[in-house]
């Protein structure tokens, strides 16, 4: 089993154990600026400051998560729909 399929399987178990399958999720591809993500800094060696990737933030039921991405996209649907998405890109 691939690494990502293994993660998806573990995520499915958590979803099932906590009754989250029909919970709605809304992800908006709003990019955090480097200042919002890491604060004001004089360092220049952070990947966030050099690369094409940006830090994206999502909210689910009052909790927040961040991820680096170079492919921004919005999502509106259920956790079950997320589990049906193919693991073909980031």
Image (cartoon, helix red, strand yellow):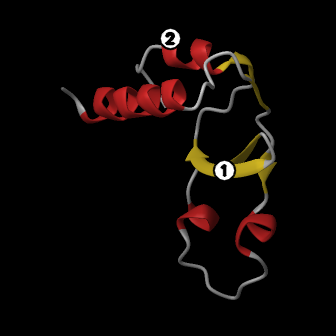
Please, is residue 25 above or below residue 44 in the view? above
Give whichever of 89, 12 is nearer the camera. Answer: 12
Secondary element type, mark 2: helix
* Image-based side of 18 in relation to 77, left or right: left
Residue 6 visible in the displayed image: yes
Q: Quadrant of the N terminus?
A: top left
Name the spot of residue 21 as percent of width and height, x first.
61, 18
Give whichever of 28, 81 is nearer the camera. Answer: 81
Which residue does the numbered mark 2 point to in the structure image?
84
Name the spot of residue 68 as percent of width and height, x first.
57, 49
Secondary element type, mark 1: strand
- Residue 37: numbered disc: none
* Image-based side of 5 in relation to 1, left or right: right
- Residue 71 lies in quadrant: top right
Give whichever of 48, 87 is nearer the camera. Answer: 87
* Outermost residue to the left: 1
Please, is residue 42 above or below residue 8 in the view? below
Please, is residue 56 above or below residue 12 in the view? below
Please, is residue 66 above or below residue 50 in the view? above
* Image-based side of 16 in relation to 66, left or right: left
Which residue does the numbered mark 1 point to in the structure image?
65
């Amino acid at each position: 089993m691939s690494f990502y399929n293994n993660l998806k399987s573990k995520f499915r178990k958590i979803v099932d154990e906590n009754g989250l399958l029909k919970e709605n999720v809304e992800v908006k591809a709003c990019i955090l600026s480097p200042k919002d993500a890491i604060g004001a800094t004089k360092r220049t060696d952070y990947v966030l400051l050099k690369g094409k990737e940006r830090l994206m933030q999502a909210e689910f039921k009052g909790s927040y998560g961040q991820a680096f991405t170079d492919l921004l996209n919005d999502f509106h649907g259920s956790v079950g729909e997320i589990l049906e998405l193919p693991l073909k890109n980031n």
